[in-house]
Image (spheres, rainbow, N blue to C red):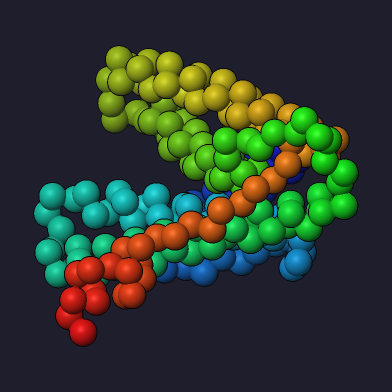
Amino acid sequence: MFSEIANRVFNQSVLDYHKYDDIDREAENPCAPGSVEHLLYLKNWVDAVQWHFEDIIRDPRIDPVEALVLKRRIDASNQVRTDMVEYIDGFFLDKYKDVKVLTDATVNTESPAWAIDRLSILALKIFHMEQEVNRTDVTSEHRAACRKKLDVLLEQRVDLSTAIDRLLADIDAGRKYMKVYKQMKMYNDPALNPVLYARK
């Protein structure tokens, strides 16, 4: 099942990132270049870095100048994340390009890669919630509350993995078809963001 591959790669990426926990460290991708695993690993690494960007920028003591620099990095990271999702969808579009679509086939609410994006984020949520469960500097009530949240996240991973595998099976059988819309982030485009083009 594809979700097994994705979850394995995401877990490896999360563990590798947290060996260093350094937002400036480049990924050392152990997966074969050109493989979907390679894309998945890079995708999760981007998500891990962004997760920690978001932690840092919420520090109430952060210097405003540093916060603005970090906000720009978050914007750039968001664009990379979106690009990575589109690369993964490109893999599926190529994989299923010769499938004969049934006449009553339907389109899914989201593409496979956007569902996989949520699975990547879920791997990070699970890792960090496990850290909270295992903390020794908090109350037992805190740990118990986090344990309940972790149980929900683990159940969510099973459900989401199942949904992704069913979606891919449906696409492979022609019961569903892929329709991918490029993300048109207008605020990143100097020609479409009125604050930016008004300054020209």
Residue found farthest to the front = 103
Residue 58 locus on image (x, y percent): 22, 49
Residue at image location 52% in from the left, 69% down from the top:
26
Residue 106 locus on image (x, y percent): 70, 33
Tell which of 184 and 20 is nearer to you.
184
Residue 156 locus on image (x, y percent): 55, 24
Q: Is residue 135 above or below residue 15?
A: above
Residue 37 in view: yes
**Which quadrant: the C terminus?**
bottom left
Q: Is residue 153 above or below residue 50?
A: above
> Which image quadrant for residue 134?
top left
Tell which of 25 and 154 is nearer to you.
154
Tell which of 152 and 110 is nearer to you.
110
Residue 120 in view: no
Asked whether, in this view, residue 38 is left or right of residue 24, the answer is right
Residue at image location 81% in from the left, 50% down from the top:
96
Asked whether, in this view, residue 167 is left or right of residue 21, the answer is right
Residue 30 locus on image (x, y percent): 70, 62
Residue at image location 31% in from the left, 51% down from the top:
54
**How many labels were placed on the picture?**
0
> Which image quadrant for residue 178?
top right
Tell which of 101 and 121 is nearer to you.
101
Residue at image location 50% in from the left, 42% down from the top:
121
**Which quadrant: the N terminus?**
top right
Asked whether, in this view, residue 97 is left or right of residue 109, the answer is right
